[in-house]
Image: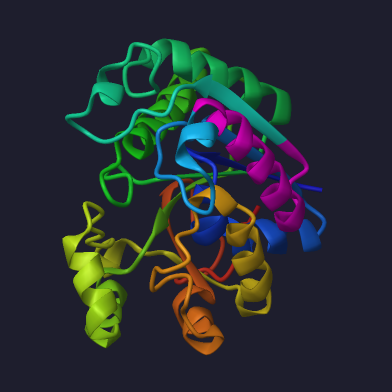
Amino acid sequence: MATLLLVHAHPDDEAISTGGVMMKARDDGHRVVLVTATRGEVGEIHNMDEESSRPRLGEIRTKELENAAHILGVSRGVFLDYRDSGMVGTADNENPASFHQASLNEAAGKLMAILREEKPDVVVTYAEDGTYGHPDHVKAHMVTNAALDQMLRANDSWSPRKVYYTAIPRSMMQAFMEQMPEEARRQSQESSIQIIGTPDELVTTRVDVKRYTERKRKAFAAHVSQNDPNSWFATMADQIYELAFGTEYYQLARGKPGSALPEDDLFVGT
């Protein structure tokens, strides 16, 4: 049995970008460890009363993550227990308890302890742009690499065979935007979240997860407080959803490819 360890920023990040490989790994007999940096205390609230839920949003989203993790086949879930940082330029981003403001060495030390316990064969996190620039996603990238670098400097007897960054091929992102309904495209263009995508030449791995798309959608739906019922994402037809999320893409950042490119599985060659 091998181990897959994922480092994510907030509850719900795990479901869409990596939910397929998590379920595939579990079905293939591997251990799945999910490390989440924050409890998502700052995000928008849907399907709940704002006034009553905001003070306990971290607790609500912790439970939602537990429900999603059960669907995704997570063997162990761990929080680094930093506060959600919110977006750049906000007061939350300046909060000393936020993940964004955390000491890089301290956060890397927390993650390093988990890595040493689990000794994962494969580690997954975000690329340096955090997919769409969120400070906590960027910090997760920095912390993961800092922890791995510290272990190398300490001459640890163990290191992962492979480290991957989640990816959305730039050409696919452009094509997807062009094919979106006009209203959905307008919502996306007006959003503070702008996803440029990973240059196609950096995408090394494409994993077919079509048989898991229904469960991926259920896992994301388990994050009730984060699901805007009026969004284009929530109302997407099943066949479009499968087309958009039935393949997960990754960039091999450390280690050697286990097959000719593109690889079709994160564990190939391990």
Is residue 268 at all visible to an observer of this figure? no
Residue 77 location in percent, x, y? 69, 35
What are the residue bounds of the magenta stretch?
Answer: 55-76
Residue 81 location in percent, x, y? 55, 21
Does the segment drawn in magenta span residue 246?
no
Q: Residue at x 26, y 82 (%)?
A: 175
Q: Is residue 139 above or below residue 269?
A: above
The answer to which of 159 and 265 lies nearer the viewer is 265
Q: Residue at x 54, y 67 (%)?
A: 259
Magenta stretch, main secondary structure class: helix
Is residue 213 at all visible to an observer of this figure? yes
The image quarter containing residue 88 is top left
The answer to which of 4 and 201 lies nearer the viewer is 4
The image quarter containing residue 214 is bottom right
Horizontally, residue 11 falls left or right of residue 194, namely: right
Q: Is residue 49 above or below residue 196?
A: above
Q: Residue at x 30, y 34 (%)?
A: 135
Residue 1 location in percent, x, y? 82, 48
Residue 257 location in percent, x, y? 50, 58
